[in-house]
């Protein structure tokens, strides 16, 4: 049973920083894209950042220059370093993994979400 375990959320003042981490527990055959999404109250879930197995990254325009996504392929982890946080970054952040099981069947995994609140 593969699970994504997220950590690092919390309350931070505007301009502050947080680092989210997501670790994969259980056996997974292959991992392609790893992403972070977020969902603010009364809004749809949106893609924040993504990173391919080769290390190519992409970001939502709203977080470019402030957030950095990284992954450790040996440890099967993905991090999101968030700097210069703004109140509008307040949301539940979700880890997402596009991978495959040992029968080479594509599998999509989601974390349980971690709350990030930016407020003074």
Image (cartoon, helix red, strand yellow):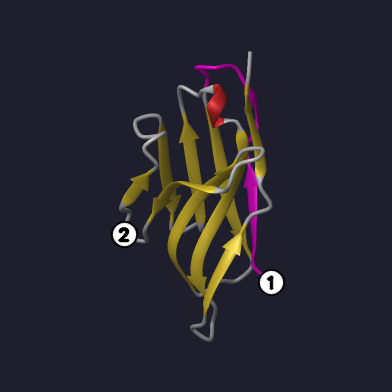
Residue at horizontal 60%, vertical 71%? 27
Residue at horizontal 59%, vertical 17%? 13
How far across and how far down the image is residue 101, in percent?
Answer: 54, 78
Q: Sort mark 1 into few (<14), some (14-19) or many (20+) by Cα contacts within 10 Å.
A: few
Quadrant for the C terminus in the image? top right
In the rendered structure, which segment of residues is drawn in magenta? 1-16
Q: Secondary structure at mark 2?
A: loop
Asked if 100 appears above or below 19 in the picture, the reply is: below
For the residue pair 45 and 78, the one nearer the viewer reads as 45
Q: Is residue 100 left or right of residue 9?
A: left
For the residue pair 9 and 64, the one nearer the viewer reads as 64
How far across and how far down the image is residue 32, in percent?
Answer: 42, 66
Q: Check disc 2 and report the residue beneath it.
A: 54
**13 drawn magenta:** yes
Quadrant for the N terminus in the image? bottom right
Q: Check disc 1 and report the residue beneath it.
A: 1
């Amino acid at each position: 049973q593969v699970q994504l375990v997220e950590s690092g959320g919390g309350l931070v003042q505007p301009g502050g920083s947080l680092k989210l981490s997501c670790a994969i527990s259980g056996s997974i055959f292959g991992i392609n894209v790893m992403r972070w999404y977020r969902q603010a109250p009364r809004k749809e879930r949106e893609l924040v950042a993504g990173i391919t197995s080769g290390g190519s990254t992409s970001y939502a325009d709203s977080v470019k220059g402030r957030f950095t996504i990284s992954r450790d392929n040996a440890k099967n982890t993905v991090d999101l370093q968030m700097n210069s946080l703004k109140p509008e970054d307040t949301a539940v952040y979700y880890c997402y993994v596009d991978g495959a099981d040992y029968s080479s069947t594509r599998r999509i995994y989601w974390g349980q979400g971690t709350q990030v609140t930016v407020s003074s």
